[in-house]
Amino acid sequence: MPRHRSGEEPRWLSLFNSIEGRVFGSQEPMVEGFPGAGRSVVRLPVTLRGDRTGVLVVELPTPEPTPESIRELERVARALGHELLVAERDTDHYRVLRRRGRLTLAAEIQWDLLAGRAYECPEYALGAQLEPAYSIRGDNFDWSAGESACCSASPTAWGRASRRPCSPASR
């Protein structure tokens, strides 16, 4: 497991049973107030062009943040999404921290070739969150959107595929 520069082990959080997971999934900020302690914790989604990147956690010295401060923190979270994209051009530090283990060379290539995780237009919205295998056995997914059609596929290592046309009705 990679270590943070401070030497601390990263803390892994579940997407299914944590507040951070709910924020990541809903893409809505959540405020947790602690009136007795005179503070609050705000969790905000970090997103770039529809791609969910993570969750920003901010502790504030007030038990109930104002709507204006929440809007300002949302702007900070959007800016952070842009900065993380730019940083990935110069370093693999953030990419390595997202992983739970080492990847084989083939898995590293597959991670870089995965289709975008999100796309939205007036007719439909696509969203996928996939953590590829740490060693490759051939499973993958892809999607394609054109002027009049959208298609997704999830082939397995055995050559079977689940193909679905995307349509406004399946939204």
Image: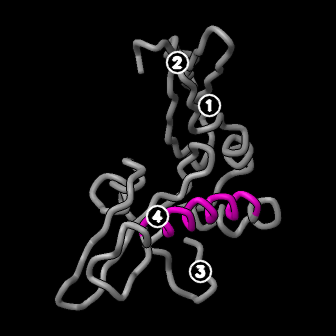
Residue at image coords 32%, 85%: 62
Residue at image coords 37%, 71%: 42
The magenta region covers: 70-86
Q: Mark 3 = which residue?
A: 4
Q: Mark 4 = which residue?
A: 71
Question: Amino acid under label 1?
Answer: Gly
Q: Main secondary structure of the magenta part?
A: helix
Mark nearer the N terminus (1 vs 4) = 4
Q: Mark 2 = which residue?
A: 123
Circles 4 and 2: CB atoms closer than 8 Å: no
Image height of 47 relative to 36, above or below: above
Q: Residues within 10 Å of mark 3 (few under 14, many from 20)?
A: few
Which residue in the rendered view is the most extreme toward the right?
90
Front residue of 70/80: it is 70
Q: Mark 1 = which residue?
A: 138
Query: How far apart are labels 3 and 1 at the CA level?
Result: 32 Å
SS for dot 3: loop
Residue at image coords 43%, 69%: 68
Expressed as whole percent of the image width and height from the top left, the position of residue 100 reads 53, 62
Mark nearer the N terminus (4 vs 2) = 4
